[in-house]
Every structure is written in C-alpha cells, then in structure tokens.
Amino acid sequence: MNFGTTEILLIVAVLFLLFGATRLPQLAKSLGATRKAFKDGMREAEEEEKAEKQIVSTPVTPQINQVHEGDIPEEVRRREEVKSV
C-alpha cells in the first residue's frame, strides 16, 4: 500500500485537527521514546539469548573427587538423581 503526497497531507491535516499544533510535538516525542525503549528491550533480549546459548554450549567437565568405599552407594544414587534432572 503506497501513500502519495495527497494522502500524507490529508493524514497530517486530520492529525492537526484532532490533536492540535501544541500536542503534536509531545505526541511525536513520546512515540520516539517508546520506539527507543522497544529497540533497547529487543537488543537486551537478544543479548540474554546469546548468553544463554553460550552457557548451554559450554561443555561441563566432570570433576573427580575422592570417595571413600563406604560412600560409593550414596555417590552413585546422587549421580543418578543429577542425570534424571
């Protein structure tokens, strides 16, 4: 849908009639601030998504701990619980 010069002038004239010349700059300023806040929010969401992907893609290296013989069944149960989560 392409707007020609006549249509744009008609829209501007209707806006002047509805809001008046004093309210239009305020309206444009608030519209610009809203647009800027939306862009900032989108950029922030993209950065968070990248950070989450980086955390997920980072391999987890297993840690080897000394376990006493009596603690082996407890350690096996704990590791199975971690795997199931």
Image (spheres, rainbow, N blue to C red):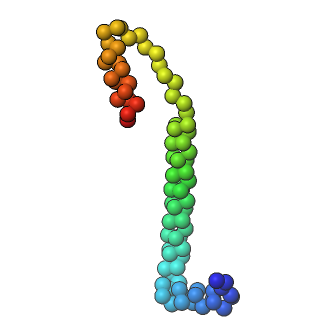
Q: Where is residue 82 in the image (x, y as percent from the top left)?
A: 38, 29
Q: Number of numbered discs present? A: 0
Residue 65 drawn at (x, y percent): 43, 14
Is 83 located above or below residue 6 in the figure?
above
Identify the residue at horizontal 41%, vertical 10% (top origin): 66
* Residue located at (50% from left, 69% from top): 30
Figure quadrant of the N terminus = bottom right
Position of residue 55 in the picture relative to residue 67 (left or right): right
| Position of 77 relative to 65 (above/below) | below
Can residue 26 be seen in the rendering of this structure?
A: yes
Q: In this view, does 2 lie to the left or right of 19?
A: right
| Residue closest to the eye, 30 or 68 | 68
Residue 39 occupies which quadrant of the picture? bottom right
Considering only vertical position in the picture, is 20 above or below 66? Answer: below
Instruction: Assign the C terminus to one quadrant of the image.
Output: top left
Residue 41 percent coordinates (x, y)? 51, 56
Q: Which residue is painted at 31% across and 9% down in the image? A: 70
Q: In this view, does 6 lie to the left or right of 60?
A: right
Which residue is most to the right?
5
Can you tell which quarter of the image residue 77 is in?
top left
Q: Can residue 51 be seen in this view?
A: no
Asked whether 4 or 22 is in front, the reply is: 4
